[in-house]
Image (spheres, rainbow, N blue to C red):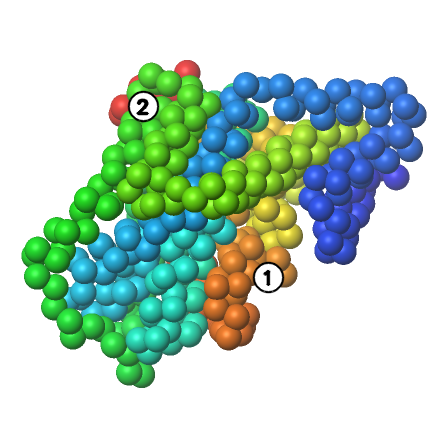
């Protein structure tokens, strides 16, 4: 069996295991150990075990549980609801203001959570029932929420970009800056699409005849400004290089915990304990996926799959455009079956040599990869955001959520094409503020 066919067999078996419900970390780790044992005996299995533990020795991984705690604490409070309420009051005169408020709130909340499902819950718990009660179409209300929550893995501080930066050894502050302009551009595309859809939708929904006074608008600021200051501070200190990601995450988590205790009244012991339990479970899951993906990458390298794939790709598609098209298709496929962090760590050992050899900037590729993974979050068969939204609104059928999300999927795909044509959209801001990458 050729190396390339072996790699294809490994991919198919991995997807089959995931489709049967095997946890991602165990699927990746188990496949790695089995194939290396069959290939070369116990010696290489030991090297994969070293990869498992070595992957967790990186100090910057401490940032992951800190940012997870930050997002979990915010999602357990009324932070998301208050952000949505503030935007709703300021945007009420605009037709479709509640949709725009939901999209804007998801954008802000993404800066706390770093996780798409957490953003769905933090924003959708209040905004989705309100939109449905006011007569907004089920597909538009639920689909726009599912799509907006994907911004959490693009807008800083994104867990996906943190993991990518650690894996590729790229400055995380530079990655955060690289994600800002594409993230804001995607928000504008989402908002424009929402207004277009609502304008051409035949149906009655309440745009809100209620007019808010300036006093009512301003009274939302004391409950929303603190979280905005925390988000801006964490990102600014990271980008400026004043703190490491682990330090920024730790301070951010502490400040958000203080905020929900003293401002939002989440001081009951059982609620705080539940927040810590939830954050611990999610952090352990992510770290196990990181370790399993490291084993997977080590196994692929030992078997020579990256070199074989690179050679095959260049034989099939000598053009750099064809190379990036094939890489995008692979990422889309993997993103439909696995969570974003797993795709990043599993695919990088294989695709990064191909991308670098084709002459692409790894910082630019980080954003393109993230956009591909955003599509996976709202695409069956897994569609983590589709599941999260349906959990918030069980009466809304899955096909309605998907129907509402697919136009936003086209927006994301369109932005991928735009970034391929104009990579400066990604690189201009980090190069201007931090200088060209060395």
Residue linked to disc 1: 380
Nearer to us in this view, 150 or 218: 218
Q: Quadrant of the N terminus?
A: top right
Q: Which is closer to the viewer, label 1 or label 2? A: 2
| Residue 237 numbered tag | 2
Q: Report the side of 303 relative to 383 (left or right).
A: right
Q: Residue furthest bottom?
A: 203
Q: Is residue 2 above or below residue 99?
A: above
Nearer to us in this view, 235 or 48: 235
Callout 2: 10 Å neighbours few (<14), some, many (20+)? some
Q: Is residue 387 above or below residue 170?
A: below
Q: Position of residue 13 (x, y in %)?
A: 79, 48
- Note whether residue 415 is visible: no
Q: Position of residue 62 (x, y in %)?
A: 52, 25
Nearer to us in this view, 337 or 128: 128
| Residue 12 numbered tag | none
At horizontal 38% and vertical 69% (from top left) the residue drawn is: 129
Q: Quadrant of the C terminus?
A: top left
Callout 1: 10 Å neighbours few (<14), some, many (20+)? some
Q: Secondary structure at mark 1?
A: loop
Residue 278 falls in which quadrant of the image?
top right
At horizontal 47% and vertical 46% (from top left) the residue drawn is: 271
Q: Position of residue 359 (x, y in %)?
A: 50, 29
**Lower position in the chain sequence, tag 1 or tag 2:** 2
Q: Position of residue 37 (x, y in %)?
A: 89, 30
At horizontal 77% and vertical 25% (from top left) the residue drawn is: 48
- Note whether residue 117 is visible: yes
């Amino acid at each position: 069996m050729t190396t390339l066919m072996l790699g294809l067999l490994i991919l198919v078996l991995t997807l089959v295991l995931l489709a049967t419900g095997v946890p991602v970390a165990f699927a990746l780790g188990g496949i790695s150990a089995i194939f290396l044992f069959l290939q070369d005996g116990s010696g290489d299995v030991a090297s994969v075990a070293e990869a498992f533990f070595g992957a967790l020795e990186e100090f910057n991984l401490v940032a992951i549980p800190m940012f997870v705690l930050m997002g979990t604490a915010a999602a357990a409070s009324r932070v998301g609801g208050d952000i949505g309420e503030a935007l709703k009051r300021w945007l009420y005169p605009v037709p479709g203001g509640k949709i725009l408020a939901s999209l804007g709130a998801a954008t802000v909340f993404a800066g706390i959570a770093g996780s798409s499902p957490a953003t769905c819950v933090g924003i959708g718990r209040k905004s989705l029932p309100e939109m449905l009660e006011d007569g907004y179409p089920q597909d538009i209300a639920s689909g726009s929420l599912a799509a907006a929550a994907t911004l959490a893995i693009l807008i800083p501080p994104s867990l996906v970009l943190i993991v990518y930066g650690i894996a590729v050894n790229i400055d995380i502050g530079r990655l955060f800056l690289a994600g800002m302009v594409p993230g804001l551009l995607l928000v504008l595309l989402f908002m424009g699409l929402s207004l277009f859809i609502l304008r051409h939708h035949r149906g009655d929904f309440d745009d809100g005849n209620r007019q808010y006074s300036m006093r009512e608008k301003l009274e939302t600021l004391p409950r929303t400004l603190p979280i905005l200051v925390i988000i801006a501070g964490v990102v600014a200190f990271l980008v400026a290089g004043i703190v490491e990601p682990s330090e920024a995450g730790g301070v951010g988590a502490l400040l958000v915990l203080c905020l929900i205790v003293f401002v939002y009244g989440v001081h009951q012991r059982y609620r705080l304990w539940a927040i810590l339990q939830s954050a611990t479970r999610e952090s352990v899951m992510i770290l196990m996926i990181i370790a399993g993906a490291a084993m997977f990458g080590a196994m692929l390298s030992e078997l020579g799959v990256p070199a074989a794939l690179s050679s095959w790709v260049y034989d099939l598609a000598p053009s750099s455009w064809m190379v990036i098209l094939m890489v995008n298709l692979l990422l889309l496929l993997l993103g439909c079956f696995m969570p974003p962090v797993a795709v990043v760590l599993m695919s990088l050992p294989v695709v990064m040599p191909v991308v670098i050899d084709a002459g692409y900037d790894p910082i630019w590729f980080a954003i393109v990869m993230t956009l591909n993974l955003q599509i996976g979050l709202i695409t069956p068969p897994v569609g983590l955001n589709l599941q999260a939204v349906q959990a918030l609104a069980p009466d809304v059928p899955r096909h309605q959520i998907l129907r509402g999300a697919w136009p936003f999927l086209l927006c994301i795909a369109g932005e991928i094409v735009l970034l391929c044509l104009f990579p400066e959209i990604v690189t201009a801001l980090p190069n201007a503020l931090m200088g060209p990458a060395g």
